[in-house]
Amino acid sequence: MEIFIENIQDEIEVTDEMLELMKKAVKACLEHEKFEHPYEISIILTDNEKIREVNSEQRNIDKPTDVLSFPIVDMYEGVIKSSQGDFDMDEGRIILGDILISLEKAKEQSVEYGHSFERELIFLLVHGVFHLLGYDHDIPEREKKMFEKQEIILKSLNLERH
């Protein structure tokens, strides 16, 4: 498994502890889903301006958001639907996709919701990972399932909401 984290912002310090917690959270999501294939996920830590640009280009929403997920593998609720073109043949891994997180937005929301920055960051990351795995919150039943899974992971990391 490979988890690539790239920090392209300079507003908020990214510590080694944050990076380790992020990797632990990704692994917890995939272990919870019993995803046993070798995988690759890229996480890009950005600022409000860059995520606004991507949000505008990809979704026609010209404002910053907290997290964006770009799945590469066609999955539905943890099950691979098609594996065509999703493999890194050189490394023998399934490339699940990319997650962009605005650390600025995460910081703003942690203050707004009254919990730690780490809790908000990991919530956004876990949310992004479950999107890569084909979960969504487009209808109430799917939202309930996705959010229950997120809470299980956050609780396992001692980051549940208080």
Image (cartoon, rainbow, N blue to C red):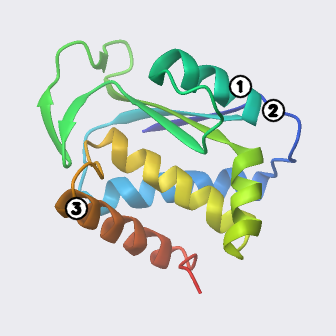
Task: Please identify the quarter of the rendering in which residue 70 is found.
Answer: top left
Tag 3: residue type?
Pro
Residue beneath disc 1: 50
In screen coordinates, is 79 left or right of 24?
Answer: left
Residue beneath disc 3: 140
146 w.r.t. 82: above or below: below
Separation of residues labelled 1 and 2 (CA atoms): 9 Å
In screen coordinates, is 5 left or right of 97?
Answer: right
Q: Secondary structure at mark 1?
A: helix
Residue at 54% x, 61% y: name it. Answer: 123
Separation of residues labelled 3 and 2 (CA atoms): 35 Å
Tell me which numbered mark, 3 or 2, is placed earlier along the sequence. Answer: 2
Residue at 25% x, 47% y: name it. Answer: 36
Q: Residues within 10 Å of mark 2 (few under 14, many from 20)?
A: some
- Mark number for residue 9? 2
Task: Please identify the quarter of the rendering in which residue 91 is found.
Answer: top left
Residue 92 vs residue 149, the one in the foreground: 149
Residue 108 vs residue 146, the one in the foreground: 108
Marks 3 & 1, CB-CB < 8 Å contact = no
114 w.r.t. 122: above or below: below
Tell me which numbered mark, 1 or 2, is placed earlier along the sequence. Answer: 2
Q: Quadrant of the C terminus?
A: bottom right
Tell me which numbered mark, 3 or 1, is placed earlier along the sequence. Answer: 1
Tag 1: residue type?
Lys
Residue 35, image x, y percentages: 25, 49
